[in-house]
Image (cartoon, helix red, strand yellow):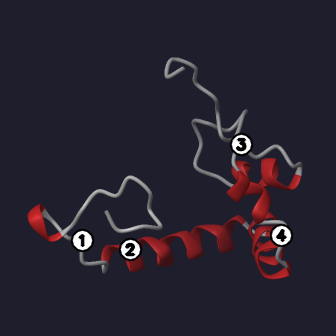
Amino acid sequence: DQTTLIEMDPGSRNTFDVGYFKQVVKRRGLFESDAALLKSSTTRSIVAQHLQSNEKFFTEFAKSMEKMGRINVKIGTEGEIRKHCAFIN
């Protein structure tokens, strides 16, 4: 059903904030990857840090966006769209 919309962080969908992490710690994430953030002590600690400090979250987000900007995206025939990300077509 591609007509049903589900918010990833209800109550905070129109605001860029840590609302997503609040849902994750309440175990209200939508995806297995959301729940996985709490399984590792390392990622659980990162989630906790983001909830303690909005400034930390925004700083880390900015760094990650800069890092993603340095990725050389393959275009045209250089790249491929994978049907399953773990396997080359």
Question: Alpha-carbon distance for marks 4 and 1?
Answer: 32 Å
Secondary element at tag 1:
loop
**Tags 4 and 1 in contact by the CB under 8 Å rule?**
no
**Tags 3 and 4 in contact by the CB under 8 Å rule?**
no
Type of amino acid under label 2: Met
Which one is nearer the viewer's eye here, 69 or 52? Answer: 69
In the image, residue 55 sits, relative to residue 7, either above or below, namely below
Which mark is in front, 4 or 1?
1
Secondary element at tag 3:
loop
- Across and down, in percent, residue 74 comes to 20, 70
Residue positioned 44% across, 62% down in the render: 85
Which one is nearer the viewer's eye here, 16 or 86? Answer: 86
Q: Which residue is mark 4?
A: 48
Q: Quadrant of residue 55?
A: bottom right
Q: Which residue is mark 1?
A: 73
Which mark is in front, 3 or 4?
3
Question: Alpha-carbon distance for marks 1 and 3?
Answer: 28 Å
- Across and down, in percent, residue 66 comes to 39, 77
Disc nearer the start of the sequence (3/4): 3
In the image, residue 65 sits, relative to residue 9, either above or below, namely below
Residue positioned 41% across, 80% down in the render: 67
Which one is nearer the viewer's eye here, 83 or 16? Answer: 83
Which mark is in front, 2 or 4?
2
- Across and down, in percent, residue 52 comes to 82, 68
Disc nearer the start of the sequence (4/1): 4
